[in-house]
Image: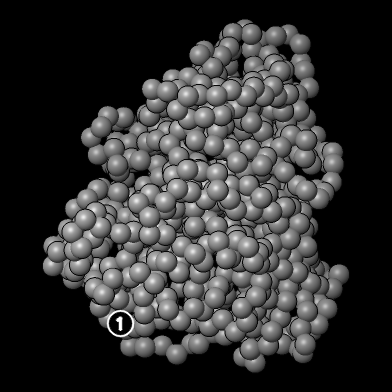
Amino acid sequence: MQTFSGIRFRVLAMSSAALLIFNFQLSAQELASQPYQSLPLGAIRPEGWLRDQLLTMRNGTTGHLDEVYAKVKNDNGWLGGKGDGWEETPYWLDGAVPLAYLLDDPALKSKVAAYINWTIDHQRPSGYFGPLTKDEREKGTQITPENCSAGEDWWPKMVMLKVLRQYYEATGDNRVIPFMTRYFQYQAAALKNCPLGKWTEWAQSRGADNVMMAQWLYGFTKDKFLLELASLIESQAFPWSSLLGGRSWVMNAAAQQNKDHWMQRHAVNVGMALKSPAINYQRTSDQKYLNDLKTGFSDIMNLHGLPMGVFSGDEDLHGNAPTQGTELCAIAEAMYSLEEIIAITGNVYYMDALERMTFNALPTQTTDDYNNKQYFQIANQVQISRGVFDFSLPFDREMNNVLGMRSGYTCCLANMHQSWTKFASHLWYAAPDHGLAALEYSPNVVTAKVGESQTPVTISEITNFPFDDQIHFELKTSRDVAFPLQLRIPAWCREAAILLNGKKVQSVTGGQIATLKMTWKNGDRVTLSLPMEVSTSNWGRNSRTIERGPLVYALKLEEKWEKAVQEDEGEYFSVYPKTDWNYGLLQQVVANPASSLTVRTVKPVGKNFVWNLAHAPIEITASARKIPAWKAVAGVAYQPVTDREGIYKGAVSPEVETITLVPYGFTKVRIVAFPVVK
């Protein structure tokens, strides 16, 4: 694949769809060539079910966290008060800002602008920024690189820099680039006296976010000190590239659950760190970093991977048993890392990984109104309840498995908002030769300037994917324009078909990028057909999961919801199954899924879409037998023992039953990793 380097864009129209100009002038010292570049926030407008999801978030905590959550609401430090000056307000803004511009919502834009304006307007003369510190308030101290200890931790500022990046790409506000330049000049000098780990290990463990932002700014200013700063930050941060490539780290994480080096096993840190090798490659062009990334991500998913496409992390990496939990923040951060990795590597492997994680792991962990979240989800989750489970962080108050606004740690209440919003803003990327690439699929409309002539085009992506295998792209342009259109063909698709104006033009096997390079006319219509076949995959404890296309399927269980209140953490919901769950799949299903499984569409993907059982559009039926001895122990469905052939050896019910499965993301209680029986 052809690559290009040093893409620049500037926003031409500040609206729900930004127009782009690409500048291919290269300087003597560039970041490494990369195949793709993110589009500015606002270039993509979500439609269909994805827009419904974002509207739910706007009406829920993403749009109103500052009104319903006291820590962010009261006397906020990022507005000059004495309240939250740590990570939670920037976390929330990191999702609320893209939501405001994806929906072109004036009220939400105004709300987030208050925090952004305060932050920019109150930058100190030295370049330092953030909430007023204790020394500033009580002693009138002026923070400089020489007395940087009067400042506060580097970590929350890393998140706010990501917020400002998105805001700049959406608005072109000319205050942002000088603001960041002054701050990085301050940081370059201050790190000698106040290294990255001076206050906490959080900044050391998450230094890749800081490196990423210094290199992003370098792409605009070409200030050489920014690359020197990036190298300095990397030298003071956890050596994630070496850890990921070294292999012994991920094996030790599977074996150890003690307090030694737990920050290097912490799943949220790992999710953030996945992009570290790619960011280092961007600065150095050293292929070793990409090798480290591939080795590390593969090892994590082999040793800690769960069927829904994410690794265990409750809070630490915790093996691949389907009874282990995953923190919602880990999903949010891993998704964002993959979105950055995709642009830098152009590797379909990571595109497929993002798709699987998004459409399976993500939806299940929040309530329909996006006001409550589950701190840890479990793959085989036969009840959501209070308890002390087999997690590396079990919690004294027993609240880390229930659905509540403040249950578990509230970092996820603040951080969950970036997941859907950043996925929506990374459906398309800028591609070589002034082209566009559709690398993730969902209903949307994208507007950009393309081709040598920089002609504006609008492409409507009309689809119900991932529930439907047909994706239509309708082009609108004021004149004919030549540019390449790239389409990802997922590895799960054996052979895709591409049609142009109803006529088949290509057949493409899965696991690659297809390119249509031609002169496009107004009204051209491309159809991408991605046939979805049923299959089974093998997971922890020799369990089997049923898959179809990008979705994994879980046992459909009737749900009983109970609401309660915990004194410290407030209202929460428990969910229990009303129907039996202790089934094993028949061996013939695994041996021949195509002839043993029946797929049926049970309802259309309609308006006001919600990821819950009532809206699940597809069901799969399978043959199974009950395993009478498989019972929940303290609310956990520990996996039955099988032999190396994967067959459960205990007694099973003589009756063969037909069970119904739905996509995992629509469930709250479920079995997704099944034992196999004869």
Residue 387 in view of the camera: yes
Left-right relation of 625 to 372? right
Residue 463 in picture, x, y percent from top left? 77, 58
Residue 397 in picture, x, y percent from top left? 42, 23
Q: Quadrant of the C terminus?
A: top right
Residue at x 50% of width, y 87% of height: 23
Residue at x 42% of width, y 79% of height: 175
Residue 324 in view of the camera: no
Q: Looking at this view, is 503 or 150 the one in front?
A: 150
Q: Name the image colouring.
A: one colour
Residue at x 43% of width, y 36% of height: 409
Task: Describe the element under mark 1 as helix, strand or loop.
Answer: loop
Residue 231 in picture, x, y percent from top left? 25, 68
Q: Quadrant of residue 54?
A: bottom right
Q: Is residue 584 above or below residue 106?
A: above
Residue at x 77% of width, y 54% of height: 464
Left-right relation of 218 to 153? right
Q: Is residue 364 above or below residue 587?
A: below
Q: Quadrant of residue 160?
A: bottom left
Q: Quadrant of residue 77?
A: bottom left
Q: Looking at this view, is 90 or 448 the one in front?
A: 90
Left-right relation of 273 to 138? right
Q: Looking at this view, is 485 or 141 the one in front?
A: 141
Residue 523 in picture, x, y percent from top left? 83, 78
Q: Is residue 574 above or below residue 632?
A: below
| Type of amino acid under label 1 | Asp
Please give the residue where the numbered disc 1 appears in the rendered image: 223
